[in-house]
Amino acid sequence: MMATMRINIGPIHPSTHGVLRFVADVDGDTIKRTETHVGFLHRGVEKLIENRMYMQSPSFMEKMDYIAPLSWDDLYVNTIEKAMGVNVKETAKYARVILLEFQRVASHLLWLGTFCNDLGQMFTSFMWSFRERDRIIKLLQDVSGGRMFYVNIRITGLNRKLPDDFKDRAYSLADYIEERILAYPDVLDSNPIFMERTKGIGVISKDNAIKYGVSGPVLRASGVGYDVRKANPYYIYEKVKFNVPTETAGDAYARYRIRYYEMLESIKIIRQALDAMPEDNDVVGMPIRLIYPQPNPTPIMNNAELPRGEGIIYMVPDKTRPYRIYLRSGTYTNIAILDKITENIKYADFFAIMGSLDLVASDIDK
Amino acid sequence: MDINTSVVRIDDSVPYSEDMFKNAEKEMTEITSRSLKKAGLNQNVLFTKLSDISKITTKGIRSWGREQSVWPLQFGLACCAMELMAFGSPRIDAERKGYLLFRATPRQCDVMIVAGWVTKSIAPRVKRLYEQMSEPRYVIAFGECATSGGPWYESYNIMQGIDQILPVDVYAIGCPPRPENLFAALIKLQKKIKGDINGDSERNASENIRRAEI
């Protein structure tokens, strides 16, 4: 019986996707148990929001999950809309869904590139996925003005009008991405190394997935078909037809398949939304200076399907600013199961498992 | 040793200096003159040329070599790291200027790009990474948070700028800066390494002042 050795992974490590720290007890090449340490990026965002007026905070929300900034931004503004009791403009609903789904595709693409980098498949998938992601970012930039942080959602609408050629560009971009994505299995699913390193690795059973409260693609990879867009539809999600892909294996490969199919489903949603979107381009929301909300004093809770899991905002509104706000991100619950699924694994598999959970340190630490 | 409480100090008794190279130059000329005597060759012609060459090499080739192969540390803290990744992606393609040798270990790197906000708990680690890099080393503060605290200016857990703990050579402004901006910052750093903007001595002096303040 060898003595176990305790080693640190992180907080600064090329594969930790941000600043996470793990303490692993290893016996030879086998990890006996790991301990997760979070909080290296904690900045007190909830407290900061409580000290700002409502529409000063979207830029904080975008830094929650910086790989898909628009999603938290939208969820936050939608929570204020619900607190104020105002309706989103009809065209803006479509526009938001299109932008959000493009954002989801961009987020999953970035995940795919970095995940394959972690597996040692240096740079082919990274280069491919970043090539597609940059096209999406170019469109979002032309819509909103920012390359990475858009701050584009305003109450009842968007910040500015959509460009005149938005529809044409969105259609052609969706075509382009679908064509490219369909080529991915050629380098991934037919690659024996990729399959060996993901199949049967980091299995989360259905019971454990429910017990630990994981969400998003990780939950659906374990056989639970829960998606907020279906379960509690917001915007136009009940009008469009799309499937919620589920897998039963619960391993890293299943999580890759889920994200892969989600990208295709997102493109389906984008196409339907573009078809049904009214032509009036009436999407501009309220100017910030006119917002003096008189919200209901009752606490409000809002959820949405973010690329990394279910995002929930619990807010106690006040006249000019939130009295109390609580943010629950999908990654924070997803990382809780990491200790469980990294018992008695090979050391090299640790990064495959961690990568497949799609963690973002900023989203965990708030 | 607990990583939270202790910070490794650099041994200041062995500073990086020009004298080291002057001594090397002397030794080099002595050795060559000795070997020339043994061979019975005319010393004077070669001797003058050698000293000329060494004058050029000590300053010129050194800074030229440093300038042309800037190896950044692969190290991302927060959102700006996404733009750091885009910096290496096909559209920007940093490799064409020789920047893309991102190394995961600080010991082989020349420049540290601090991309993201620095919390109080990560600051000692960042400082330790910097101290593990071999000299000469350079720091780029990438983005608003690393420059001045950015949007977190009221946060209780964020350092208001990385220059509180490290000597910064170039600031790249933006939230986040575009990858092109990082290009501009690195070109500026190259100029600085070449000696067009600030001399080494000036930089070392400011570094010593900062270190004394901590």
Image: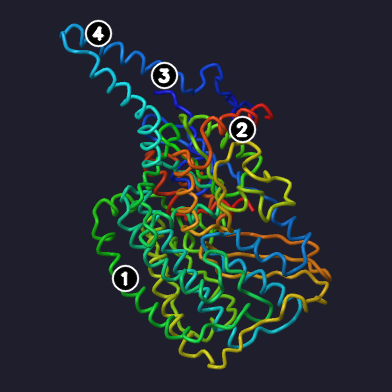
Kind of residue at badge 3: Lys
Query: Which dot, 1 or 3, sits closer to the camera?
Result: 3
Which residue matches tag 4? B34
Which residue matches tag 1? A180
Q: Can you tell which mark lies on residue B206?
A: 2
Where residue A113 sits, quadrant-wise, is: bottom left
Cβ atoms at labels 4 and 3 below 8 Å apart: no
- Measure the alpha-carbon separation of dots 1 and 2: 51 Å
Cβ atoms at labels 1 and 4 below 8 Å apart: no
Residue at screen point 59% across, 70% down: A304
Q: Looking at the image, is B6 positioned above or below residue A333?
A: above
Which residue matches tag 3? B22
Q: Residues within 10 Å of mark 1 (few under 14, many from 20)?
A: some
Q: Residues within 10 Å of mark 2 (few under 14, many from 20)?
A: few
Q: Mark 3 belongs to which subunit?
A: B
Kind of residue at badge 1: Arg
* Pick the front one: A241 or A67: A67
Where is residue A161 drawn, in percent x and y?
Answer: 58, 83
Q: Quick one: quadrant of the C terminus of chain B? A: top right
* Pick the front one: B161 or A235: B161
Instruction: Same chain for labels 1 and 2? Say yes or no.
Output: no
Query: Which dot, 1 or 2, sits closer to the camera?
Result: 2
- Measure the alpha-carbon separation of dots 2 and 3: 23 Å
Question: Between disc 4 and disc 3, whose residue precedes?
Answer: 3
- Measure the alpha-carbon separation of dots 1 and 3: 58 Å
The answer to whether A46 appears left or right of A152 in the picture is right
